[in-house]
Image (tube, rainbow, N blue to C red):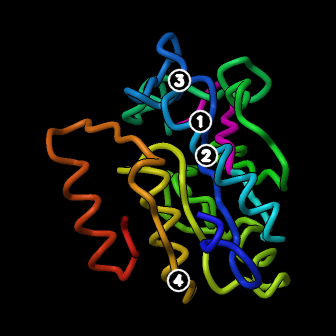
């Protein structure tokens, strides 16, 4: 694992939050809590090798078109300043946090948000931060593999970054059966090293 990190590589931890990792969370991802120890080991390896660590965090308003209550597909989740939006208490947080969905936009990717009405995309600060640090490769872990992890990894590829996605450090929503397999195929087609 330590060989994954060093100059030019960053670790991106996607949405390891209570609403996704707690079986009582509003949008629990089955097995989400099982990956935290492995992610913490990745964090330790990255920090020891001098690689920067970034965290994405869903941080939605109470009402947004992203939620089923506003016309979207998801139950209300990760509402800012609620327990569900907080990182899982066992997760080690040693790096910059990138909040997404703050203004009601769809925040699937840690690199960009999308206006749910117009579809227009806007960049988060993550791409700029990685460029400032000379990062050319990212390791992407977290939740969920068929949504925010996938979109973050694909966005990283669009920015010309090499991407490693260890499958043992993500879990999938599988809103439709086979979403996990389709996501992995899409990632591999985009040049993501899925391992």
In percent of the image, x 80 and y 24: which residue is there? 81
Name the chief secondary structure element in magenta.
Answer: loop
Tell me which corner region of the image, top left, top right, bottom left or bottom right, holds residue 156.
Answer: bottom right
Q: Quadrant of the N terminus?
A: bottom right
Q: Residue at x 48, y 30 (%)?
A: 34
Q: Secondary structure at mark 2?
A: helix
Considering only vertical position in the picture, is 61 above or below 151? above
- How far apart marks 2 and 1 lie (CA) works out to 5 Å
Q: Which residue is mark 4?
A: 162
Q: Position of residue 31 (x, y in %)?
A: 41, 28
Circle 1 residue: 36
For disc 1, the neighbor class at 10 Å (few under 14, some 14 to 19, many from 20) is many
Looking at the image, tell me whether mark 4 or mark 3 is earlier in sequence order: 3
Q: Is label 4 in contact with label 2 (beta carbons under 8 Å)?
A: no
What residue is disc 2 on?
Answer: 39
Asked whether the residues under the numbered discs 2 and 1 touch, taking CB atoms below 8 Å apart as contact, a structural biologist would say yes
For residue 24, the mark is: none
Q: Return the disc, 3 or 2, that comes first in the chain's sequence.
A: 2
**Secondary structure beneath label 4:** strand
Residue marked by disc 3: 76
């Amino acid at each position: 694992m330590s060989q994954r990190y060093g100059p030019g590589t960053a670790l991106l931890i996607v949405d390891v939050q209570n609403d996704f990792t707690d079986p009582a969370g509003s949008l629990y991802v089955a097995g989400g809590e099982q990956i935290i120890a492995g992610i913490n080991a990745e964090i330790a390896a990255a920090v020891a090798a001098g690689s920067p660590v970034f965290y994405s965090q869903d941080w939605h308003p109470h009402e947004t078109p992203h939620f089923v209550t506003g016309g979207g597909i998801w139950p209300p989740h990760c509402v800012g300043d609620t327990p569900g939006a907080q990182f899982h208490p066992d997760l080690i947080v040693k790096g910059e946090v990138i909040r997404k969905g703050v203004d009601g936009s769809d925040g699937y990717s840690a690199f960009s948000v999308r206006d749910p009405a117009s579809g227009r995309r806007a960049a988060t600060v993550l791409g700029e931060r990685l460029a400032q640090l000379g990062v050319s490769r990212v390791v992407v872990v977290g939740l969920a593999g068929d949504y925010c992890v996938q979109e973050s990894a694909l966005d990283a590829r669009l920015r010309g970054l090499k991407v490693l996605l260890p499958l043992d450090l993500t879990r999938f929503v599988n809103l439709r059966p086979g979403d996990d397999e389709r996501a992995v195929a899409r990632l591999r087609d985009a040049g993501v090293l899925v391992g």
